[in-house]
C-alpha cells in the first residue's frame, strides 16, 4: 500500500485501523488520493463483513439471500444495507405490553454483541429497557421515530458512538 503519511498516520495504519480516519484533520482526510481511500474502505469493509456475517443474524440471512459470500468491490456491499424498516420490525405489542425480554431478543438479531444474558425483568418502561441494555452491555441504543411515528432502535457499540461523535 501507499506509504503516504498524513497527520502521523500512514496508509498502512489506516488499512489496519480505518477508524483512525476519524482522528485525522479534515485536510489530511480529504486529500488522501482516491485509490488509497478506496483501498482502505475496501479492506475495512471486507473485515467487517467477514466478522459480521456470522455474528449478526440479520446480516448473515441477508447475505445468504443475496448470494453474497465475500466482498470484492465496494459496490458489493450495497445489497447488504438494511432498510430502515429493519430497525423497527419488532411487534408493537413488545412495547405496548412491556415485553422487554422479547424486545431484547429481537434486538439481538441486529448486533454482534450477545444480549441473551441481559436481565430486563425489572424494566417497567422503555427508558428502563434502554438503561438496562446500556448498563449490562457495551451497546448504546439510539432511536428515532422518523416520519412513521414508530420507533427505530439502532444498536451501537460504545466505541461506535464515540467514533460517530468524534466524526461530527
Image (cartoon, grey):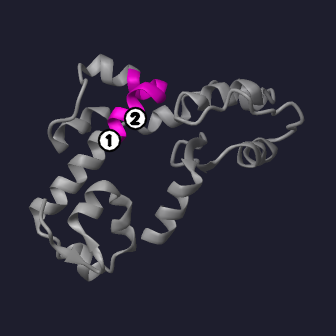
The prevailing secondary structure element of the residues shown in magenta is helix
- Residue 73: x and y in percent read 15, 40
Whether 52 is among the magenta residues is yes
The residue depicted at 41 percent of the width and 33 percent of the height is 52
Q: Is residue 161 visible?
A: yes
- Residue 12: x and y in percent read 23, 61
Depth check, front residue: 17 or 107: 17
Whether 149 is among the magenta residues is no
The residue depicted at 75 percent of the width and 26 percent of the height is 101
Q: Are marks 2 and 1 in contact (CB under 8 Å)?
A: yes
The relative height of residue 25 versus residue 158 in the rendered view (above or below) is: below
Task: List the residue tagged with mark 1.
Answer: 47
Q: Is residue 15 left or right of residue 39?
A: right
Mark pair 2, 1: CA separation: 6 Å
Q: Quadrant of the N terminus?
A: bottom left
Tell me where the magenta segment starts and ends, as one range: 48-60
- Which structural element holds mark 1? helix
- Residue 54: x and y in percent read 42, 25
Tag 1: Cα neighbours inside 10 Å, few (<14), some, or many (≥20)? some
- Residue 159: x and y in percent read 54, 56
- Which structural element holds mark 2? helix
Q: Is residue 32 left or right of residue 66?
A: left
Depth check, front residue: 127 or 158: 158
The relative height of residue 70 versus residue 152 in the rendered view (above or below) is: above
Task: List the residue tagged with mark 2.
Answer: 51
Q: Quadrant of the C terminus?
A: bottom left
Q: Is residue 92 visible?
A: no
Amino acid at each position: 500500500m501507499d506509504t503516504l503519511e498524513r497527520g502521523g498516520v500512514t496508509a498502512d495504519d489506516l488499512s489496519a485501523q480505518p477508524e483512525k480516519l476519524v482522528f485525522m484533520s479534515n485536510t489530511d482526510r480529504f486529500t488522501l488520493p482516491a485509490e488509497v481511500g478506496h483501498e482502505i474502505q475496501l479492506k475495512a469493509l471486507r473485515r467487517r463483513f467477514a466478522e459480521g456475517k456470522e455474528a449478526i443474524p440479520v446480516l448473515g440471512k441477508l447475505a445468504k439471500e443475496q448470494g453474497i459470500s465475500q466482498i470484492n468491490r465496494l459496490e458489493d456491499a450495497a445489497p447488504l444495507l438494511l432498510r430502515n424498516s429493519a430497525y423497527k420490525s419488532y411487534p408493537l405489542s413488545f412495547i405496548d405490553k412491556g415485553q422487554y425480554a422479547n424486545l431484547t431478543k429481537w434486538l439481538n438479531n441486529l448486533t454482534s454483541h450477545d444480549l441473551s444474558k441481559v436481565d430486563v425483568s425489572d424494566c417497567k418502561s422503555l427508558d428502563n429497557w434502554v438503561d438496562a441494555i446500556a448498563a449490562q452491555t457495551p451497546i448504546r441504543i439510539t432511536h428515532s421515530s422518523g416520519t412513521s411515528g414508530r420507533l427505530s432502535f439502532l444498536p451501537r457499540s460504545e466505541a461506535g458512538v464515540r467514533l460517530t461523535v468524534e466524526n461530527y
